């Protein structure tokens, strides 16, 4: 499978997916740690891809949505953003609402 097809399929088949460095249990950078904690605090299970374990994804994900950094959170097939945006949305309550809506549809 082409790497872009793999990325697209991963995003489309998961209502909430986080592309991060490491895993939610063992994040490998502070930004990935903060983002995964915020998503976890919303109370809905989510998928993740460790971009350190999948170097092709790491090298090509920026081509999918023109977003150059990690982590990247996708909800309902759409890019939400990176750590700063996710944290802003979490603090305002918008992240939980968005994730719940995507998980229920």
Image (tube, grey):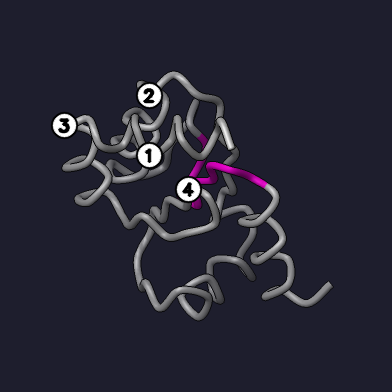
- The residues bearing labels 4 and 2 have C-alpha atoms spaced at a distance of 13 Å
Dot 4, how many residues are within 10 Å of its Cα: few (below 14), some (14-19), or many (20+)?
many
The residue at the point 29 percent across, 35 percent down is 34
- The percent position of residue 26, horizontal first and vertical second, equals 48, 30
Q: Secondary structure at mark 2?
A: loop
The residue at the point 64 percent across, 59 percent down is 54
Circles 4 and 1: CB atoms closer than 8 Å: yes
Residue 41 is covered by the magenta coloring:
no
- The residues bearing labels 1 and 3 have C-alpha atoms spaced at a distance of 13 Å
| Circle nearer the N terminus (4, 3) | 4
Q: Secondary structure at mark 1?
A: helix
Q: In the rendered image of this protein, does residue 54 appear above or below residue 23?
A: below
- The residues bearing labels 1 and 2 have C-alpha atoms spaced at a distance of 10 Å
According to the picture, the residue beneath numbered tag 2 turns out to be: 42
Q: Nearer the viewer, residue 42 or 1?
A: 42
| Circle nearer the N terminus (4, 2) | 2
Where on the picture, by quarter, is residue 70?
bottom left
Give the foreground label among 1 and 2: 1
| Circle nearer the N terminus (3, 2) | 2
Q: In the picture, which quadrant includes the N terminus?
A: bottom right
| Circle nearer the N terminus (1, 2) | 2
- The residues bearing labels 4 and 3 have C-alpha atoms spaced at a distance of 17 Å
The residue at the point 60 percent across, 38 percent down is 47
Dot 1, how many residues are within 10 Å of its Cα: few (below 14), some (14-19), or many (20+)?
some
According to the picture, the residue beneath numbered tag 1 turns out to be: 98
Residue positioned most to the right: 1
According to the picture, the residue beneath numbered tag 4 turns out to be: 75
Q: Is residue 80 left or right of residue 13?
A: left
């Amino acid at each position: 499978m082409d790497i872009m097809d793999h990325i697209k399929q991963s995003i489309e088949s998961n209502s909430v997916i986080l592309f991060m460095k490491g895993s939610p249990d063992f994040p490998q950078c502070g930004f990935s740690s903060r983002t995964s904690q915020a998503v976890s605090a919303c109370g809905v299970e989510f998928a993740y891809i460790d971009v350190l374990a999948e170097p092709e994804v790491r090298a090509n994900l920026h081509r999918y949505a023109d977003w150059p950094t990690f982590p990247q959170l996708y909800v309902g097939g759409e890019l939400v953003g990176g750590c700063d945006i996710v944290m802003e949305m979490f603090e305002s309550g918008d992240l939980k609402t968005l994730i719940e809506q995507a998980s229920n549809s």
